[in-house]
Image (cartoon, helix red, strand yellow):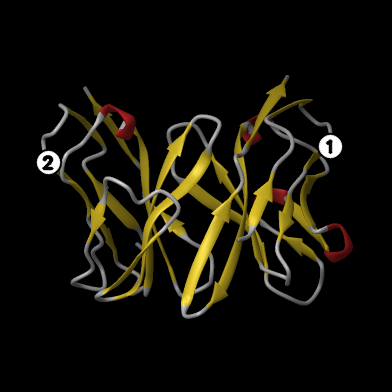
Amino acid sequence: EAQVTQNPRYLITVTGKKLTVTCSQNMNHEYMSWYRQDPGLGLRQIYYSMNVEVTDKGDVPEGYKVSRKEKRNFPLILESPSPNQTSLYFCASSQQYNEQFFGPGTRLTVL
Amino acid sequence: AQSVTQPDIHITVSEGASLELRCNYSYGATPYLFWYVQSPGQGLQLLLKYFSGDTLVQGIKGFEAEFKRSQSSFNLRKPSVHWSDAAEYFCAVGVEGGGSYIPTFGRGTSLIVHP
């Protein structure tokens, strides 16, 4: 089954404790991206990757890092999480400029 | 930079009534256009998309959308709403250029369906 998986689905952590949210897709898509969803703000892109070893900032990259060492994986790293990063995070992938396939989301709470 | 406006934060309709969700975009050329639906606790699912050609596009679940270049709009419609259509709807535009691709989403419209 074609899908985008994210782990964990739910995470509660404390300020400053490094964390990684994994994202994996099995559709051989070149384009992958991370979004955060906040009430009233819709989806805002954090980072995206056009292909392996090619990443770039989206609209709200501050406080986040990503890497794309393999085509299928695109982890999101929060090196020192803060409460304003409490949000619902989505990973997505697509074949270049086509429709995006979204993961189920990761709900992160930073205390 | 492109932008997407969904003017209605919430829309309430009765089951069986028709529906139109508005979407306007700001971009110099014709971008790629998408409508996604997000059911409670779920990720986003594509309803339909427009790249070129016929300006009236059909999607899943009985939805359709019409691209109007003169109005920079891509409104979503459904002739008869079902209770299961209650969800959040997002319009999105995709713009390519300079070797990059930046999708931009609207803030979403929450659809409430009354029995």
Residue B17 picture location, percent across and down? 83, 32
Q: Position of residue A52 (x, y in %)?
A: 26, 76
Question: Looking at the figure, which quarter contains the N terminus of chain B?
Answer: bottom right
Q: Are marks 1 and 2 on the same chain?
A: no
The correct choice, above or below, for A61 with respect to A74 in the image is above
Residue A19 appears in which quarter of the rendering? top left
Residue B83 drawn at (x, y percent) = 67, 29
User: Hey, what amino acid is under mark 2?
Assistant: Lys
Picture quadrant of residue A10: top left
**Relative to A57, residue B44 above or below:** above
Counting other residues with Cα less than 10 Å from the Cα at mark 1, is it few (<14), some (14-19), or many (20 or more)?
few
Viewer-nearest of discs 1 and 2: 2
Residue beneath the point at 76% across and 63% down: B57
Label 1 resides on the chain identified as B
Residue at 60% across, 40% down: B107
Secondary structure category for the residue under label 2 = loop
Residue B8 visible within the image: yes
Label 2: how many Cα within 10 Å (few below 14, some 14–19, many 20+): few
Pick out the residue farthest to the bottom: B99
Please report contact status of discs 1 and 2: CB closer than 8 Å, yes or no.
no
- Amino acid at dot 1: Ser
**Does residue A87 appear to the left or right of B94 in the view shown?**
left
Residue corresponding to mark 1: B18
- In this rendering, position of residue B99 left or right of residue A28: right
Query: Residue beneath label 2, please?
Result: A18
User: In percent of the image, x 20 and y 72: which residue is there?
Assistant: A70
Image quadrant where one finds the C terminus of chain B: top right
